[in-house]
Amino acid sequence: MSRKFLKESTIMKIHYITGLAALLTVAVHVMMRVVVPFSISLEYENVVANYQNILYALLLESVLILISIHGFNGLRVMLLELRQNATWEKFVTLFTLIAMLAVIGYGTRTIIVVSGQSL
Amino acid sequence: MEAVKDKQDSNGRTNREGLKGWLNPTRYGWERLSYWLMRLTGLFLLLYFVGHVYETSNLVGGLDAWNAMLELTQTTFGHIFLILVIGASTFHSVNGIRLIFAETATGLGKPGRPDYPYEAGSLNNIQRSGIWVALILATAAMLYGSSVLFGGE
């Protein structure tokens, strides 16, 4: 039996914790868009001003990381339900891990660049 | 479990339906529907999330790039899609909380001897009503989203 980096029970706890935390952070993120009329909240200047608030930028980064972990782990669980063998499990785990890191990297780049932009 | 007749896998098993079985929400009651919706909404939200991360990256391109992206997404179809996202995320969240309660054995009652008709004690009215609450809240959230997106507020 191959040694696992994390037990499945630990991964599921992370899945539940990231799900609950994402619920809270996404609720705040959505509320920021309905505090003013929705179409006005999407104007370029308003959005960039949000990104330049350090607390909001940290919130966005949290949303990005939490949902990436929760979502790609969910995908991993679904794919492992379909088929079970050692090769498939390694492929699915590696694929979802790389995809998760890619999305986090790409989103973090957006947050860093936009928060440093001048209007 | 229903067997797929005359279709054996390499181990001689006949009950491997694969994706087709997975996509079938019937046969096993409300809990199966909840399982099916949880996975569908999860996949849908994951795809939306990846698209959203890409869509917001247009900010890096400046005002023109952002406005070009808004022209694509702030349409009737875009708003309908967003309403589906609101419904999916509400159902996924509420049902997820119900599942956390189920997996921590909260609200399941005490274990008992399996007597005929062998109804599982864990599939009680509290759990079943949790599924209904998730569906009702998702509908309410979609209605609220519609009022915001199409109501001009």
Image: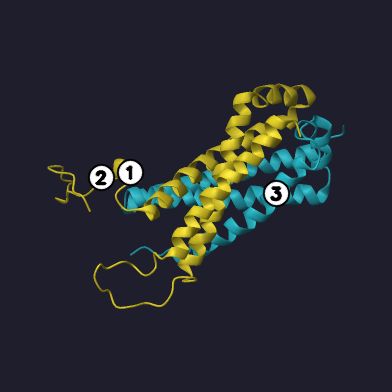
Under mark 2, the amino acid is Glu
Marks 1 and 2 share the same chain: yes
Chain letter, yellow in picture = B
The percent coordinates of residue B84 (x first, y second) are 56, 37
- The kind of secondary structure element at disc 3 is helix
**Residue at mark 1:** B24
The percent coordinates of residue B10 (x first, y second) are 17, 47
Q: Residue at x 83, y 46 (%)?
A: A53
Is residue A78 shown above or below B117? above
Mark 3 against mark 2, which lies toward the viewer? Answer: 2
**Chain letter belonging to callout 1:** B
Q: In the figure, is residue B70 to the left or right of B126?
A: right
**Residue at mark 3:** A61
**Residue at mark 2:** B17
Q: Residue at x 65, y 32 (%)?
A: B55
**Which residue ends up furthest to the left in the rendered image?**
B6
